[in-house]
Image (spheres, rainbow, N blue to C red):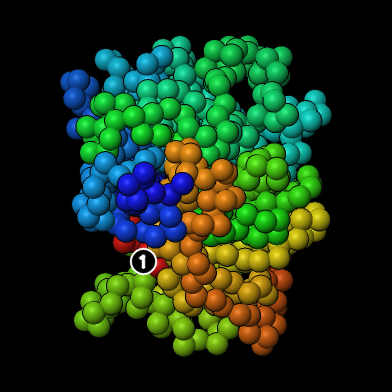
Amino acid sequence: MDVTADGSENYVIGVDYGTLSGRAVVVRVRDGKELGSGVFDYPHAVITEALPADVAGAAGGTAARLPGEWALQVPNDYRDVLRHAVPAAIADAGIDPAAVVGIATDFTACTMVPVKADGTPLNEVPGFANRPHAYVKLWRHHAAQGQADRINALAAELGESWLPRYGGLISSEWEFAKGLQLLEEDPGAYAEMDHWVEAADWIVWQLCGNYVRNACTAGYKGIYQDGRYPSDDFLAALNPQFKNFVSAKLDHAIGRLGDAAGYLTAEAAAWTGLPEGIAVAVGNVDAHVTAPAAKAVEPGQLVAIMGTSTCHVMNGAELREVPGMCGVVDGGIMEGLWGYEAGQSGVGDIFGWFTKYGVPPEYHQAAAEAGKGIHEYLTELASGQAIGQHGLIALDWHSGNRSVLVDHELSGIVVGQTLATRPEDIYRALLEATAFGTRTIVEAFRDSGVPVKEFIVAGGLLKNKLLMQIYSDVTGLQLSTIGSAQGPALGSAIHAAVAAGKYADVRAASEAMGAAPGAVYTPIPENVAAYDALFREYRTLHDYFGRGTNEVMHRLKAIQRSSTQSLPDESLNSVSLTAEEVSA
């Protein structure tokens, strides 16, 4: 099934849409060999301060200033990935495009696009280019925390059966909270919007002309459980104008993972250089699609996709309620198993932020003189330290906490700094903090009857050997890395092969096309003991600031919002960390 009638090879394309760029990989159907790749950086990156003048000002308007906790993107940047990264990958592979039989995509979730009935993004509709709510709300848009709090409080009060499936809390990152924010802050844009679409589904719509809602994001981010969404009565209790949100804006045909959503249109064929009519797989999420790429399709195999953030996914044979999880969905990763998801909202983003704003020029100069990147240089300095030598404990909440507290009003902190503290000390403490956050998640799984048996890492951060050893030592688990630099794109390619009919199902395609393990890290007993002591201190801070009655971080966020509302309304340039800055 993996070659044509004349014996020539078949190929598939996997496209991974990340936070800062899109990556396309050409993969051989027969064995999963990656033959070529292409990357396209989003021209507008992540918009956090003001709408980009070249888009918002195109119709003569001004670039609107954004409040805090906003994170937007420009949907046409996603189309440009198809126009640039896919042809580049084909050229890099040196294959005949006619031999490509399918394409599949994955996306960061929950990334939401307000669109018209024909799929046109709202920011491209005349009169809406300078309205922030008309743009893509990226996964790390956390400005809907107030709406999420109301959803959680009402669901708990009413005893909604779906709430325990999400660890007892709905995130501000998800579809309903962001949709409610849109309604309440820009009702005109809400009324103009015909569909509230996950970017994972919107890009598939662009490729094949069909809008198919994927089962993964519907279950994990859209509160779709046991064949239904929250009721109209529940939504009306949040806001009477929100009553018909599901039926009017959200509900749509749901496609099974690995199925074909449709076939490549002539327009998309012109963008990509691929043959018109090839299979386009149902959309998926970057983390979940990586599990088959890592051959982690059995219960207990935890895959951590580590990049700007980290998403932890794992299959389980039974349904369990795990506090603070992003969700548990029947078939959410693999057909016939319960797919569990947890996550950390900031990991590589934290390291990148620190190197950009917390490291003095002389360190950057020394790194350049040594022919090293700043992350490599700081890692080398930090590697020479004994565990605990820096005297610091950090909380990895610079972008809020996704699991297990599900609270994006929380913020980062470093305890123990003195006049002797150096940048490499803080850098190592931040690396350790993210490992402590992962251990908190692993223990939540274990304590809920979903034990982690294997720990597999994918994503851009796996190349940092110090970081990987820290994670192994902190969790006490043997850690293996995926033998692919493009795990999500490979996972998408596996789904493309299934959608094209080259394998019976995702499990069979994973066995044939999944990547072999890369480097393996084994916990060092004395390091495990040392980190146990530090982890106890981490949990003390974790519970003090994240649980109970302490509200200092929430009060600081409220003060911040209040103060920014009084600033002048001049336009600011959008800022974002580059891929280099978040790669440790």
- Residue 378 at x, y percent in the picture: 38, 77
**Mark 1 neighbour density, 10 Å: few (under 14) some (14–19) many (20 or more):** many
Q: Residue at x 36, y 40 (%)?
A: 101
Q: Can you see residue 270? A: yes
> Could you tell me residue 279's position as x and y percent?
40, 34
Residue in the picture at 73% in, 39% down: 165
Q: Secondary structure at mark 1?
A: helix
The residue singled out by tag 1 in the image is 355
- In the displayed image of the protein, which residue is found farthest to the front? 6
Among the 4 quarters of the image, the one containing residue 356? bottom left
Q: In the rendered view, does 529 fall on the left or right side of 136?
A: right
Which quarter shows the C terminus?
A: bottom left
User: Residue drawn 21% across and 81% down?
Assistant: 369
The image quadrant that residue 104 belongs to is: top left
Q: Position of residue 582 (x, y in %)?
A: 38, 60
Query: What's the amino acid at mark 1?
Result: Thr
Of residues 566 and 583, the one drawn nearer to the viewer in this rendering:
583
**Left or right: 130, with 224 as reference point:** left
Relative to 402, is 277 on the left or the right?
Answer: left
